[in-house]
Amino acid sequence: GNVYDGAFENSEPHGIGKMYYNDGRVCKGIWKNGKIKYEGKLVDGKPHGRGKKMYPNGSVYEGEWKYGMRRGKGTSKWTDGSKYEGEWKDGKKHGSGTFNYSNGDVYSGEWRAGKKHGKGVRTYANHDFYVGEWKNSCKDGTGTLTYHNGDVYKGDFSNNKMHGKGVFEYAAGDVLKSIGEWKDGKKVGFFEDIVRVSK
């Protein structure tokens, strides 16, 4: 049969140990109640180097570790089908990476301390997409939001809303584009509307 070498609790592998399987495989890592919870390299009993951790909620992280924290390149998968693949620091998404949401949205770009921050692209399940700057996981700064109906807004954003100078180009209708100032997603003050010329 299989042979386990390591810490036990209640007659089951529990703690740091190695399982030698009949087929020649060796599984070393941290065990809990007879099941492997972390498989990979350890330093002072903590994940360090490449490894794979299975969490109680069913999510899995596979990648690089540093003294027990996700750090470097790695992939996390959640039970709802969402997935992040990219860089980590201090256990949080940090650097460049791609997050596939369970609803079909995809964000690819820069992260800081677990939040979308810097330049990035988010494609929404309804086929809208945003290319631009992010701050604390919100559209913030300069960007372009293209709607699935063909309308396009180019300009400033704050806290996920059109805010500041911008140009809204309409895919259909009498007005071709509106140029002006936005506040909290609404037009404010004077706007220059350029009318579509019909032939």
Image (cartoon, helix red, strand yellow):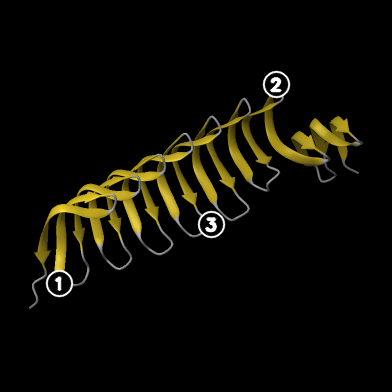
Residue at left offset 25%, top offset 60%: 152
- Identify the residue position indicated by label 3 in the image: 102
Q: Regarding mark 1 in the picture, which secondary structure is present there?
A: loop
Q: Secondary structure at mark 3?
A: loop
> Horizontal and vertical percent for residue 16?
78, 29
Estimate how packed mark 2 is, as few (under 14), some (14 to 19) or many (20 or more) residues with alpha carbons within 10 Å.
few
Q: Residue at label 2? A: 44
Identify the residue at horizontal 76%, vertical 38% (top origin).
27
Image coordinates for residue 196, horizontal then vertical, percent: 11, 70
Amino acid type at circle 1 is Asp
Instruction: Tell me what residue is drawn at x 73 percent, y 39 percent.
Output: 37
Q: Quadrant of residue 171?
A: bottom left
Give the left or right position of residue 76, taking residue 58 as reference.
left
* In front of the other: 49 or 159: 159
Which is more N-terminal, label 1 or label 3? 3
Above or below, 34 relative to 103:
above
> From the image, which quarter does the N terminus lie in?
top right
Residue type of the residue flagged with mark 2: Asp
Figure disc tally: 3
Q: Residues within 10 Å of mark 1 (few under 14, many from 20)?
A: few
Report how far apart the C-alphas of labels 1 and 2 lie in the structure: 69 Å
What separation in Å lies between label 3 and label 1 (alpha carbons)? 38 Å
Q: Tell me the amino acid under the disc marked 3.
A: Ser
Residue at (15% x, 67% y) in the render = 175
Q: Which residue is mark 1?
A: 174
In this rendered view, identify the residue nearer to me: 151 or 5: 151
- The image quadrant where one finds the C terminus is bottom left
Pointer 3 or 2: first along the chain:
2
Of residues 60 and 42, the one drawn nearer to the viewer in this rendering:
60
- Residue 114 circle label: none
